[in-house]
Image: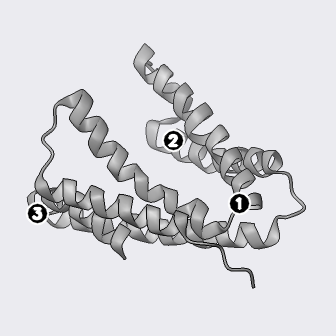
Amino acid sequence: ALGLGGVVSIFSDQLRSEGTMALLGSIALVIAAVSSSRSQVWIKKHSRAVDPLTLATWQMLLGSFPLIILGWSVEGGWTSPAVWPVEAIAALAYLSIFGSAIAFFVLYWLLRRMAVTKVLTVAFANPVVAVLLGWVWLGEVLSPWALAGAAGVLASLWLILAAPVEKN
């Protein structure tokens, strides 16, 4: 609750200024997080015999097909010439390798060795990192609400990660 409250506090300025669409987007993100968490708990329970590299590989392969079909149908198939700036290629390569393949391998590796609650709570750090990067590289202003929210998120992470794991 403290971490979720912190995230809400971090983005409260944007929710007020962007209106209904920002609220709907935030609700969609919460639903996505719940869905992702549910699948990770299932994976923790049922995938002991499957190697983390195999899990990550199949996830990337099977997940790419719907994305290719959607991209192909929305962008007009292969007849539309694609112009790819170097920045776009670099971003795609970085996200494909580090943001997907390596990240999911590490996630599945950690799920075999740690409690699922501890592994998944690290995602609460993402908004804090995003706000700090915006402040450092883009000169964005840190509001008191964002600072209070970041403190709440970091406190919640400490509480969860420092707690002893109970064995059932």
Q: Position of residue 10 (x, y in %)?
A: 23, 58
Chain-order first, disc 1 or disc 3: 3
Please tell me whether mark 2 sits on a helix, a strand or a loop: helix
Indicate which label's residue lies in the foreground, 1 or 3. Answer: 1
Does any portion of residue 97 appear in the rendered image? yes
- Could you tell me if the residues under marks 1 and 3 are in contact, i.e. CB atoms within 8 Å? no
What's under tag 2, amino acid-wise? Gly
Q: Is residue 153 left or right of residue 31?
A: left
- Could you tell me if the residues under marks 1 and 2 are in contact, i.e. CB atoms within 8 Å? no
**Camera-nearest residue between 73 and 163:** 163
Q: Is residue 13 above or below residue 84?
A: below
Q: Position of residue 20 (x, y in %)?
A: 17, 67
Residue under pointer 2: 71
Chain-order first, disc 1 or disc 2: 2
What's under tag 1, amino acid-wise? Leu
Residue under pointer 1: 111
Cα–Cα gap, marks 1 and 3 = 37 Å
